[in-house]
Image (cartoon, coloured by chain):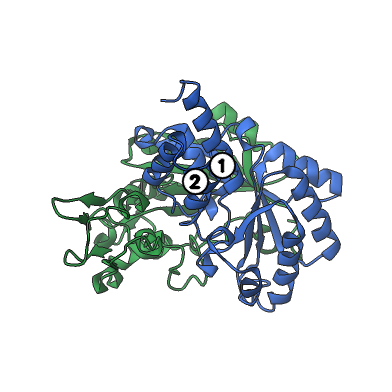
Chain colours: A blue, B green
Amino acid sequence: MSHALHRHGTVAQLQNDYTFYARTSRYVNREGCGPKLRKILSILLEEKSLVNFGSSHSGKSYEAGLNPEEYATTLDKAYGVAACFSDKETIRSILAKLKEADTGISIVISGLIDEVVKIAKDLGLKPHTAFLSLGVHGKKALLPEDRVLQVTTMCGHGQVATRLTKAVMDRVKEGKMTPEAGAHLLAQPCPCGIFNTRRCATILEAYREEARAGSAS
Amino acid sequence: MRIDPEECGGCLECIDFCPMGCILERDVGVAIDEDDCVECGVCLRAGVCPTDALYMPEESMRWPRVIRAQFSDPGVQHPGMNQGGRGTEEMKTNDVTGRFRRGEYGMALEFGRPGIGTRLTEIEKVLKVLAAMDVELERNNPVFLLVEDPRTGRLKPEVLQEKVLSAILEFKIREAQLENVVRALQPVLAEIDTVVSWGLATRFAEDGTLPVRQRLEALGVSARPNAKINMGMGRPIVER
């Protein structure tokens, strides 16, 4: 999941894309982490704007049918929980609750730096470490168009195929599939729960609207 | 992965799901280009094959081909790492491990991402450059397990032609090394036969800023506006 810092998009395109991780360290606090991770999961599930959650050990995300109660039973000795949200105010709410809960588990937010740092300051939190993206290098001619990258880079493990994304975009454009159904289909290969279906549906809808206006290629 | 030609009904449903685009339509049905396949298992897990023609053959789990699944399927753990996903905690737990301290930067080069995949040969090209510099390769990382000689950057020869969906090369540098390391990496990254997503881990300054962004800007490798941020909520916290 190290790829979440590289989620593709401009500042405007990333306004609705925040990912959350609670992570145990195998060196420090994985032993006995179950109750703490379950507490964190319960805080996430309280949020109405939770988009998706899971982790690679679960084998599938909420969007792919992961049952929250069953998932909670798998969190003993787990390396963590991941989730995604489509607004920064939910991130603020979660961090406030986690500050109160004081679980001692590492919390990581992936999103627009300035927004996340501002929320931290507002809540009296002191961000510790940043993992900055220095972009894509090498043979960039191999990459698909920006719009496809906005979708495929939302999977932390690269499981969402360029070809599937293009096929779904075409189906949405032709009116054979709704943007929401397209986003749901594209989320299926991503097991860790950070594929943001709400953002994806927005991207697909914009593509459809541009096509209708005659400007999409 | 492989497709049983006797079972394949030629519906083509699996083709779009392959992240490497290596399921190919044939005169009758489809077949997987096994040299390009990274054994991610996405096609199988998609559950779209109505005749169960997709399967993972025993050879996929034999050395050295087995590293394809280890680096490409998040459900397969790297041996000895006790860590899911890409096999690294990177900076997600830095508030409790102190892996990256003040005065240091962590670097992560994710080869093959987004969406292209990589042969291990491409990683070796960069490793050889780094070996000539005074950088600290991360040993608790699955790529390091494939290094034959850290002094030269050579990988084990039998893994070189293996292809994976992505692999993260991690190393640590001192702050003062930033300019030299970036300038050494830029030409070799420009020449490799895949793409690399480049990340840099840094501690926040006491005033909550990230001074490295200005140094990166001057080097022509501007940081993107989004990042992963460890919120400093782990306990006991490592402040140094």
Q: How crowded is mark 1: few (under 14 residues within 10 Å), some or many (20 or more)?
A: many
Whether label 2 touches label 1, CB < 8 Å: yes
Q: Is mark 1 on a helix, strand or loop?
A: helix
Residue at the spot of label 2: A182
Q: Quadrant location of residue A17?
A: top right
Both marks 2 and 1 on one chain: yes
Q: Position of residue B65 (x, y in %)?
A: 28, 65
The correct choice, above or below, for B177 with respect to A42 in the image is: above
Q: Kindly identify which chain the residue marked by label 2 belongs to.
A: A
Residue at the spot 26% in from the left edge and 74% down from the top edge: B58
Question: In what quadrant of the picture does the N terminus of chain B appear?
Answer: bottom left
The correct choice, above or below, for B87 with respect to A113 in the image is: below
First reached walking from the N terminus: tag 2 or tag 1: 2
Q: Is mark 2 on a helix, strand or loop?
A: helix
Q: Kindly identify which chain the residue marked by label 1 belongs to.
A: A
Asked if residue A65 lies left or right of residue A37, the reply is left
Q: Where is residue A107 in the image (x, y as percent from the top left)?
A: 70, 58
Asked if residue A13 lies left or right of residue B136, the reply is right
The correct choice, above or below, for A179 with respect to B153 in the image is: above
Q: Which mark is residue A39?
A: none
Residue at the spot of label 1: A201
Amino acid at pointer 1? Ala
Q: Where is residue B114 in the image (x, y as percent from the top left)?
A: 43, 44
Question: In this figure, what is the number of numbered marks?
Answer: 2
Residue at the spot 78% in from the left edge and 55% down from the top edge: A94
Residue in front for this viewpoint, A60 or A117 = A60
Asked if residue B60 lies left or right of residue A189, the reply is left
Residue in front for this viewpoint, B78 or A217 = A217
Asked whether residue B73 appears in the rendered view, the answer is: yes
- Toward the front, the furthest residue is A176
